[in-house]
Structure formats: C-alpha cells, structure tokens
Image (cartoon, rainbow, N blue to C red):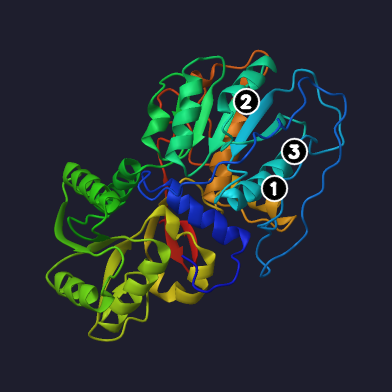
C-alpha cells in the first residue's frame, strides 16, 4: 500500500508483491493474460559464448531501480555475460509474471536474476526467463523438456497460474520449484516444491521466539479477513504447543479499522498482563497501529526512552515488515519488534548477496534470495554427477531449502528491529 501516488521504486514493488505471495494465497492478485504466447528466452542448446547484456541504470528515489512500467518485455534470448559456457552448464528456466498486472515484479526479478547469473564465477547455470502467465504453459513445458532443462523456478502471486504449472509438473520430466504460498504448489509431491514461508511456519517461528524468552501470555491483533482468521488459528495452536496462550484477541474490519479504538483495547490488555503482542498487519497498517499505541502509552519493547508511567510490550510482526521506506518514517515505533524472515542482510550470506546487487543499485530482498536459492538448487542438481534435488538441502543465501518434502522452506530467521534496521535477534 503506497503512502503516496508516486510510482513506487523497485524495493516497494518487490516487498508489496512478497506480501501477496506470503498471504497464503488469500490476497493474491489476478494478473491479465497476454494476447499471444511469448518466445522462449534461452537458445535450445549450449553456446560457446554469450551476448553482452546491460542492466538498466535508472535510479528511482536513490534506493533501487525499476524497469519502465509500460515498456514491452525485454528480449530475454541473450545470455547475461560475454563469457564461454561449458556444455555441461545446466539450463534453468525462471518463469515470471512478465505480462499483466504483476509485470513490474517480473521485470524487477529478471534484473536481479540476470545480474547474479552474470556475476557467478565460474558460471553455474544458463538462465532462461519466460512468461509464467502465458496461456501456452504446456508448450513452454514441452520446449524446456526438449532442451533438457534442469528445472523451472516459478514466481507469481496468481494461484491459478501456479495450478497450471503444477499440472504440467505432474507429467514429470522437470522439477518445479514454486516461490508462492499457494497450496496448489503442493499438489505434485516429488515433482513440485513450495519454497516460501506459509502461515504455519511463521506461527511456529514466532511461538518459538516468544516461549524461548519465557513469555506465556500473548495478545493478537488482526483483521477479520479469512486469511488472518487462518493465521490467528495457526498462531494460537503454535503458542499452545509451546506452553503459552493467546490471552487477548482483537479482530477489526479489514477495510476500515479504527486504530484509536483498537489501541485503547490493546492498552487495557497490556495493563492486564499481556507480555507480547502479535500484530498480523501489513507494514502500513502496523505502523499506524503502533503509532496509536504509543499515543496511548504502550511502546514496542526496544524503545529505551519510554516516558515515565507508560508501558512497553514485545511486538511480534510478519515477514512483510522488512520495508525500508516505512521504517524510515516509523522506525521508533518498531524498535525491538521481532520479525520472522527467510533472509537477512546482516548474515554473511545476506551481506554477500547485498554487495553483489548494490554494485548495480539493486536491493536484496527475501523474494530475490528465495528465487536465486531455488535457481541454484536446480542448477546444482542438474550438473553431471549432481545429487538428486530431493536429497539436496540448500542454504547459501537464505535460512535454508530442504527438498526432502514438498514444503522446502523449513525454518526462518528471527530478526529484530534495532537502530532502525533489522538484525539477527539476540
């Protein structure tokens, strides 16, 4: 949810769509279908040399780059670097929403993937970028099988698109890794895997972090949407399994929340003995609620200058809270809050990815990391002598993908807001 009408920079687009992807499918945006199927983006066979490719140098608001929203999809037939590739270098397809309402997401992710592929030394994969929203999914799947591709990584917020690709995966021939929380991704065990956090993993992570701190009474604030209903139910079950309880639950209308009223009721619960507060809200709504709570004398527990006579509570957030634009305006209210995430810039792997993308003005996000981790896992399994994907736990850039079960993302980092940024929690 942008806070103004300006065109959002790349970081905003990626983070907002990550919110769609990780909302258990309930908030998925339905993208338009293209009028004609796109062409494949990689040549049928290995080449001895690749054509040079440049990265768009437009910088928006000094933080990230984005392709022109109205520009046609770029020709993806060229490889990313002028360098020889071994015939054994595996071909991996990246299926992105290159048309329709989420096309800017696809363009942004393509920039990241191509730059990372071009800076791998030695080259680890040949990258084919295709339109996930093409109506010719079966044709694209057959073409990739003919080219002996190592697999497909699919990133889309559209559940129907996920279902159509998983249906192709049922036919075998190629592994499919889906970076979307849609349950449809789990419909072909052993042939398709889901590689993003769902509500159950988020709930388990938050419950573990709270119980480890000795907290036993938790409050929950969420909307009355079906998605949040599911998230609250899973959170309550996870807390109960850890010996804690949800002693306060407040649901509000999803479209017209009265934050003043919500904050008054929440304050009363904190004064009644609530030690932690799970705020299952997107970043904009969370910042509004935390600001109202502060006005009523309740602060996130990391704030060191809590006014005399006021209170603090441990705040628990969602993975979508990693939003630098919002934190720049509301950092004080988030201080000390705990956030589960599959990626952290401050880890050694995260710092390495951040450095590679910063050199061309791109910002590393959790969605970028999950996409690239999935590509690298398929490439690793596709090399001659490589282990089967199902036997290859992989944790280079993220908290770790394990393809021994359909839900490949097994754990999340617990991050903490400290000094206006996210760092691994103490």
Q: Nearer the viewer, residue 241 or 187?
A: 187
Q: Is residue 301 left or right of residue 421?
A: left
Q: Nearer the viewer, residue 172 or 204?
A: 172
The local secondary structure at tag 2 comes to: helix
Quadrant (top left, top right, bottom left, bottom right) of the C terminus: bottom left
**Residue 257 sits above or below residue 68 on the image:** below
The local secondary structure at tag 1 comes to: helix
Q: Nearer the viewer, mark 2 or mark 3?
A: 2
**Residue 309 sits above or below residue 362 on the image:** below
Q: Nearer the viewer, residue 154 or 343?
A: 154
Q: Residues within 10 Å of mark 1 (few under 14, many from 20)?
A: some
Q: Evaluate whether residue 73 shows in this view.
A: yes
Residues at marks 1 and 3, CA–CA distance in whole angstroms: 11 Å
Q: Is residue 403 left or right of residue 55?
A: left
Q: Residues within 10 Å of mark 2 (few under 14, many from 20)?
A: many
Q: Which mark is residue 140?
A: 2
Mark toward the start of the polypeptide (1 vs 3): 3
Quarter occupied by residue 154: top right
Q: Evaluate whether residue 335 shows in this view.
A: no
**Residue 3 sits above or below residue 197 on the image:** below
At horizontal 36% and vertical 44% (from top left) the residue drawn is 24
At horizontal 57% and vertical 44% (from top left) the residue drawn is 369
The local secondary structure at tag 3 comes to: loop
Q: Which mark is residue 76?
A: 3
Residue on which the image places disc 1 = 111
């Amino acid at each position: 949810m942008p806070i103004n009408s300006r065109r959002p920079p790349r970081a905003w687009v990626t983070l907002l769509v990550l919110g769609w992807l990780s909302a258990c499918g309930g908030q998925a945006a339905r993208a338009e279908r293209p009028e004609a199927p796109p062409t494949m983006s990689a040549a049928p066979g290995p080449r001895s040399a690749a054509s040079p490719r440049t990265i768009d140098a437009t910088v928006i608001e000094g933080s990230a780059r984005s392709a022109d929203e109205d520009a046609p999809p770029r020709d993806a037939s060229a490889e990313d670097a002028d360098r020889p590739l071994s015939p054994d270098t595996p071909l991996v397809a990246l299926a992105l929403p290159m048309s329709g309402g989420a096309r800017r997401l696809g363009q942004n992710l393509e920039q990241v993937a191509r730059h990372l592929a071009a800076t791998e030394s030695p080259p680890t994969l040949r990258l084919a970028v295709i339109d996930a929203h093409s109506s010719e999914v079966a044709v694209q799947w057959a073409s990739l099988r003919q080219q002996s591709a190592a697999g497909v990584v699919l990133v889309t917020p559209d559940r129907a698109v996920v279902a159509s690709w998983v249906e192709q995966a049922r036919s075998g021939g190629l592994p499919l890794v889906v970076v979307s929380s849609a349950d449809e991704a789990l419909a072909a065990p052993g042939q398709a895997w889901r590689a993003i956090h769902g509500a159950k993993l988020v709930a388990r992570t938050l419950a573990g972090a709270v119980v480890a701190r000795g907290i036993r009474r938790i409050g929950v604030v969420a909307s009355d949407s079906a998605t949040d209903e599911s998230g609250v139910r899973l959170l309550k079950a996870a807390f109960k399994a850890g010996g804690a309880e949800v002693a306060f639950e407040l649901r509000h209308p999803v479209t017209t929340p009265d934050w003043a009223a919500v904050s008054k009721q929440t304050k009363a619960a904190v004064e009644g003995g609530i030690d932690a507060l799970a705020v299952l809200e997107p970043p904009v709504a969370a910042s509004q609620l935390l600001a109202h709570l502060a006005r009523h004398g309740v602060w996130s527990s990391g704030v060191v200058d809590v006014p005399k006579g006021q209170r603090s509570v441990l705040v628990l957030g969602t993975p979508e809270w990693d939003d630098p634009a919002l934190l720049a305006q509301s950092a004080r209210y988030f201080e000390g809050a705990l956030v589960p995430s599959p990626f952290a810039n401050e880890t050694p792997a995260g710092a390495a990815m951040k450095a590679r993308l910063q050199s061309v003005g791109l910002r590393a996000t959790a969605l970028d990391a999950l996409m690239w981790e999935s590509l690298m896992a398929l490439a690793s399994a596709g090399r001659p002598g490589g282990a089967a994907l199902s036997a290859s736990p992989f944790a280079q850039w993220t908290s770790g993908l394990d393809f021994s079960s359909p839900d490949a993302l097994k754990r999340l980092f617990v991050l903490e807001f400290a000094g206006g940024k996210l760092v691994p929690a103490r």
